[in-house]
């Protein structure tokens, strides 16, 4: 059963191209095609669990743009507020899958994408936020361009005026902007947020916060920005294809710990976004402890399927949380 809440996400989605198997890009003669972008990944995870989701972006009106919108609708995500343009382009990115000791590698081709050109005033946020409960974006979106940063600030301000909770994933990308510029923009955004989702590494790079434990990092962020919840994902990398995955959340002056899963990874891209979608679903339904449990479980399952988007169901997530084993499900 779907919640009464509604989530709105805003950001970039690109076309993802990957060589088959473990080939290097310069070896490739065929490429596997997926769509993926942080905020769409979040919307899909939330929607699949039962939290109604709407995705806002700017896309070029061509087959690639339609591919992205079609994929969002395939998962039940509302796309009625996408801004369409006949100019610009849809961004691309390439994922080259490694194997220990060679890590996975990502190459971006997103310069002059449609969403990078978005400007304040292009989205009717008053209409978008009608009947919505929570707004989510990430540090990737404002990093795309000066106008995208201004549009993100506009969106967050409109969400606050409309009475929505605001969720932000720090999502620092060194190839998009400097730590100094990220600190300047993200400070202004996080000061208006209610929920922050991040990693200890991103927190150190953007805000210069480093403590002796993840718990202390989360508490420091909550106190500095007056946040009601701070979630930190935790990944232990035993090898490229075998990781241990968990998360914590600081809320109500307490630490809530998610389950820990040892994962045989198929594709880890988008796992943090699936955590965010699962966390927001659980948080709105039953508070921070439920949020971190749903977030960790659905993002663990996401890492077992190819592509950025999660294909798990709520039933599968709850079976995993209930201790579901590895025997064939018949």
Image (cartoon, grey):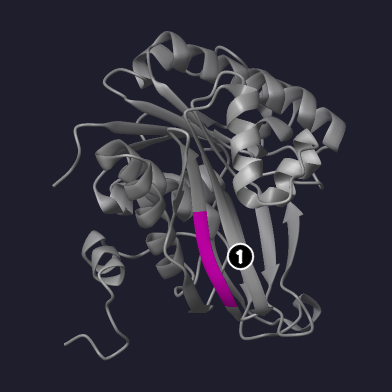
Q: Residue at x 45, y 59 (%)?
A: 309
Q: In the drawing, does residue 47 fall left or right of residue 10?
A: left
Q: Residue furthest bottom?
A: 327
Height in image: 296 above or below 164? below
Q: Residue furthest left?
A: 1
Q: In the drawing, does residue 312 fall left or right of residue 23?
A: left
* Along the line of sight, the residue nearer the viewer: 63 or 317: 317
Report which quarter residue 330 is drawn in.
bottom left
Residue 53: give x, y in percent of width and height: 33, 38
Q: Which residue is mark 1?
A: 235
Q: Is residue 71 visible?
A: no
Residue 271: give x, y in percent of width and height: 52, 60
* Along the line of sight, the residue nearer the viewer: 321 or 51: 321
Height in image: 14 above or below 219? below
Residue 264: give x, y in percent of width and height: 51, 82
Q: Secondary structure at mark 1?
A: strand
Q: Which residues are magenta?
A: 243-247
How crowded pointer 1 is (Cα within 10 Å; few <14, some 14-19, many 20+) is rated as some
Report which quarter residue 314 is drawn in.
bottom left
Q: Residue at x 44, y 8 (%)?
A: 161
Is residue 115 a member of the stretch shown in magenta? no
Q: In the drawing, does residue 156 fall left or right of residue 2?
A: right
The overriding secondary structure of the stretch rendered in magenta is strand
> How many numbered marks does the figure carry?
1
Q: Residue at x 78, y 29 (%)?
A: 183
Height in image: 81 above or below 73? above
Residue 118: give x, y in percent of width and height: 62, 25
Q: Residue at x 26, y 21 (%)?
A: 131
* Along the line of sight, the residue nearer the viewer: 209 or 60: 209
Q: Is residue 8 visible?
A: yes
């Amino acid at each position: 059963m779907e919640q009464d809440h509604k989530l709105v996400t805003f950001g970039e989605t690109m076309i993802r191209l990957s060589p088959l198997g473990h080939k290097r890009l310069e070896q490739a003669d065929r490429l596997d095609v997926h769509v993926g972008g942080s905020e769409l990944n979040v919307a899909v995870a939330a929607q699949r669990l039962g939290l109604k989701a709407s995705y806002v972006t700017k896309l070029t009106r061509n087959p690639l743009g339609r591919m992205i919108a079609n994929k969002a609708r395939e998962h039940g995500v509302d796309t009625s507020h996408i801004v369409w343009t006949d100019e610009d382009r849809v961004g691309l990115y390439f994922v080259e899958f490694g194997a220990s000791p060679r890590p996975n590698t990502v190459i971006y081709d997103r310069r002059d994408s449609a969403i990078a050109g978005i400007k304040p005033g292009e989205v009717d946020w008053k209409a978008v936020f009608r009947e919505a409960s929570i707004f989510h974006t990430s540090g990737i979106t404002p990093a795309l361009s000066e106008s995208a940063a201004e549009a993100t600030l506009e969106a967050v301000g409109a969400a606050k005026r409309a009475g929505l909770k605001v969720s932000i994933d720090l999502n620092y990308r060194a190839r998009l902007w400097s730590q100094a510029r990220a600190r300047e923009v993200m400070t202004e955004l996080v000061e208006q947020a209610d929920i922050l989702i991040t990693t200890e590494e991103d927190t150190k790079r953007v805000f210069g916060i480093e403590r002796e434990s993840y718990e202390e990092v989360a508490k420091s962020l909550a106190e500095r920005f007056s946040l009601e919840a701070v979630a930190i994902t935790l990944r232990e990398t035993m090898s490229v294809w075998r990781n241990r995955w968990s998360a914590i959340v600081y809320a109500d002056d307490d630490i809530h710990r998610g389950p820990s899963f040892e994962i045989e990874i198929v594709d880890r891209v988008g796992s943090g976004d699936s955590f965010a979608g699962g966390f927001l679903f659980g948080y709105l339904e039953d508070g921070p402890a439920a949020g971190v449990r749903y977030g960790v479980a659905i993002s663990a399952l996401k890492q077992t399927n190819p592509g950025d988007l999660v294909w798990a169901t709520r039933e599968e997530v709850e079976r995993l949380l209930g201790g579901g084993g590895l025997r064939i499900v018949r």
